[in-house]
Every structure is written in structure tokens, then in C-alpha cells.
Image (cartoon, helix red, strand yellow):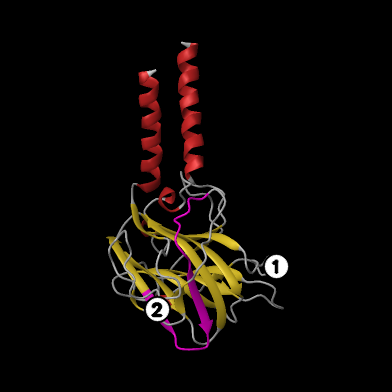
Amino acid sequence: MKRLSLVAVGVSCMLFQSAYGTLLFSDGFNYDSGGPLAGNVNPGSGDTWGVGNSAMTIGSGNLTYPGLEDLGGNDLSIVWNGGTAGSVTNGFANITSGTIYYSFLLDVTTAPGGNSYLTSLNPGTSTPNGSSDAISMYFGTVTGGGGYRLGVRGGGASAVYTSSSTPYSLSTTYLVVLGYNFNGGVAANNLSLWIDPTSFGGSAPTATLTLTPTTVATGIDNVGFKVQSSVAGAFLVDNLLVGTTWADVTVPEPTTFALAGLGLLGLVIARRIRR
């Protein structure tokens, strides 16, 4: 019985490590509701969300996604209202090889009025800037309205979008994951976008979209959000995660961990009984 207890602890530790082993950044936006994102200090990294824009504020809601761990806190409200453009960024350890992933929950409350970008990963102090980003997530319009498309862009290449025939719905929470593979180079599809992936933890499934950049970033160490001045749109963002494995940014809720652990423990018990 004592050995089985140790096995259960070991299983739990392995599951925990697979989810958090290389987590670089996380934010549930647990800051004062109604205030700006800029100036808040991320509790995990200790780095401050810098500069900012008055149209990027902390909301009063909390986006959640079935089966995915919830970071709690509030959400981030970003409004493209034809005012002054601006960006907010925060940093983490510089990554120069392998793959870097980031995920977040997205709820579009007002459809974007034009094709443009909301968020990106970049090197150094670079802020979201469209085509020159290492990797950025784009919105695409839909003819006749009724929703929006999602796309990925980076490294000087043109954005690629999901089909306009199956637009995403307003006031609906989606799980968005982006991945940048340094090892892919310009000869491979090393920019990837997943929308509502069904696989949490473990390895990355087939991407919704992939893109080959014209140039490859030498490193990535910040995440940023952008307020556009030339187009309209309103967005809620929550549960921001950045890591070097798929499992880092798609962490199942604790009950899922427990069930997986019990399943593995059951297999061990069954094997011992057969002996």
C-alpha cells in the first residue's frame, strides 16, 4: 500500500512537471478592474506592463474554457475605437531555439472593421508592428458581416486566414494558441496557429494554420497587445500563457489531472494484481 501511495505521488509530480516545466510567463489579469493594463506588475515574472493605451483596460469578467485550467482574476479589454494607436508589452526569458508557444482565451464582442493584428511575440523591446513581428495574430473581416476570421503573420510574410465561409462568432470564448519554431527556418512552416485545439497537455496537434516567414527571428522575449486607430473592434482576452512546450500553454484543469493520475494508478494496481 505504501508503494502504491508513492506511485500516486510520482504520477502527480510527473503530470505537474509536464504542464509547468518550462512555463515562461502567465497572467490572469488579476489587477484592479477599470484601471489600465499599463503599469501593472506581473506577479510571476515581476516585470511591468509598460507604456500603454487608454483603450486597453482591466475588465470585470473572467473568461474560462471547458477542461482548461483557469488562472482566475479579471480579463483584459482592448477596444479599437478610431482613437490613438498604442501597444503594451511585457517580457520573459529570451528564447533563441526550439519552439515557443503562447495561448490565451479570446472573446470578440465587436467584429473588427478591417484586417489587422491584436497581439504578437517579439525580440527585445519591439512592440507589435504587423509584418515585422516574429509572430502575430490577425483578424480578418467577413463579407456581409456576421463574424470574423483569424489569421497568423510574421517574418515579413503576408497573413494567412481561416476560411470566410466558416467565420467565428461574436461573444463566444475561443482558445487561441500560436507557435514559433526557430528550428524550422524560412524553408519550413515554422509559424503556427491553433483555434480551439482539442488536445490539452502532451504534444501539439495539427495546426489550424501554418506560415513560412521570409526572415527568422534571432530571439523572442516579449509579448504585446495592440490598439488600432484606423479600424473598430472590441476584444476580451484572458489566461495568457507563454512557454516552450505545448503542455506549458494548454494546462488541463485540476480535475483532469486527477483523473489522469487515477487512471495511471489503476493500471499499476491492475498489473500488480495480475502478478
Residue found at x 37% / y 48%: 20
Residue 200 lies left or right of residue 38; in this view the side is right
Q: Residue furthest right?
A: 144
Q: Is residue 74 magenta?
A: yes
Residue 158 location (% of width, % of height)? 50, 74
Q: Horizontally, is 192 left or right of 6 in the view? A: right
Q: Horizontal placement of 215 versus 266: left or right?
A: left
**Nearer the observer, 240 or 242:** 240
Distance Cα–Cα, label 1 vs label 2: 31 Å
Q: With respect to residue 68, does 108 lie above or below? A: below
Tell me if mark 2 has few (under 14), some (14-19) or many (20+) residues whose alpha carbon lies within 10 angstroms of its own. many
Question: The disc labelled 1 sits on which kind of residue?
Answer: Ser
| Above/below status of 258 relative to 245 | above
Residue 40 disc label: none
Whichever of labels 1 and 2 marks the residue nearer the N terminus, that label is 2
Q: Is residue 185 magenta?
A: no
Residue 225 visible (yes or no): yes
Q: Residue tagged by mark 1?
A: 165
Query: Which residues fall within the magenta stretch?
Result: 68-88
Q: Position of residue 93 (x, y in %)?
A: 28, 60
Q: Looking at the picture, tell me which residue is in the foreground, 19 or 194.
A: 19
The x, y position of residue 74, in whole percent, is: 47, 64
> Element at badge 2?
strand
Q: Residue furthest top?
A: 275
Where is mark 2, residue-wise? 87
User: In this rendering, is residue 203 above or below 131?
Assistant: above
